[in-house]
Amino acid sequence: MSPILWTAWVAFFVVYETIALLNRKDGDTLSENTRGLFRIRRSKAGRAIFTVAVAGGAVWFLLHILTESM
């Protein structure tokens, strides 16, 4: 069941993001929403929090996959 759910989630994301990229409306892509959520363009603190969150998540995921733990 899990592979079906992951495949469906990825497919939904690809379709939704493709539509958002093609329609060229402001504020509907994942990147635009992420920039807005963390206030990347206006806040050094938001930029720092985003950087730590993404870097921390990447490090955790790398360790999780390589060590088969957590």
Image (spheres, rainbow, N blue to C red):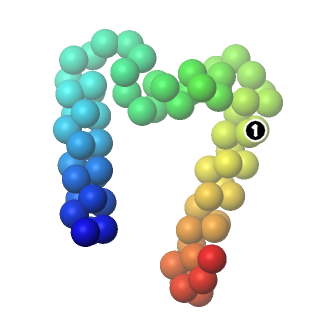
Residue farthest toward the right in the current orientation of the protein: 45
Residue 17 spot, x, y in % from top left: 28, 34
Please say if 24 is above or below 32.
above
Number of marks present in the image shown:
1
Please say if 18 is above or below 69.
above
Q: Residue at x 70, y 17 (%)?
A: 42
Q: Quadrant of the N terminus?
A: bottom left
Q: Residue at x 45, y 32 (%)?
A: 31
Q: Amino acid at mark 1?
A: Ala
Q: Which residue is mark 1?
A: 48
Residue farthest toward the front in the current orientation of the protein: 1
Residue 30 spot, x, y in % from top left: 42, 33
Please say if 30 is above or below 14.
above
Name the element at disc 1: helix
Q: Quadrant of the C terminus?
A: bottom right
Residue farthest toward the bottom in the current orientation of the protein: 67
Residue 5, located in which quarter of the rendered image?
bottom left
Circle 1 Cα neighbour tier, 10 Å, few/some/many (<14 / 14–19 / ≥20): few
Q: Residue at x 20, y 38 (%)?
A: 15
Residue 7 spot, x, y in % from top left: 23, 59
Residue 41 spot, x, y in % from top left: 64, 20
Position of residue 56 in the picture relative to residue 44 (left or right): left
Q: Residue at x 51, y 78 (%)?
A: 65
Residue 21, located in which quarter of the rendered image?
top left
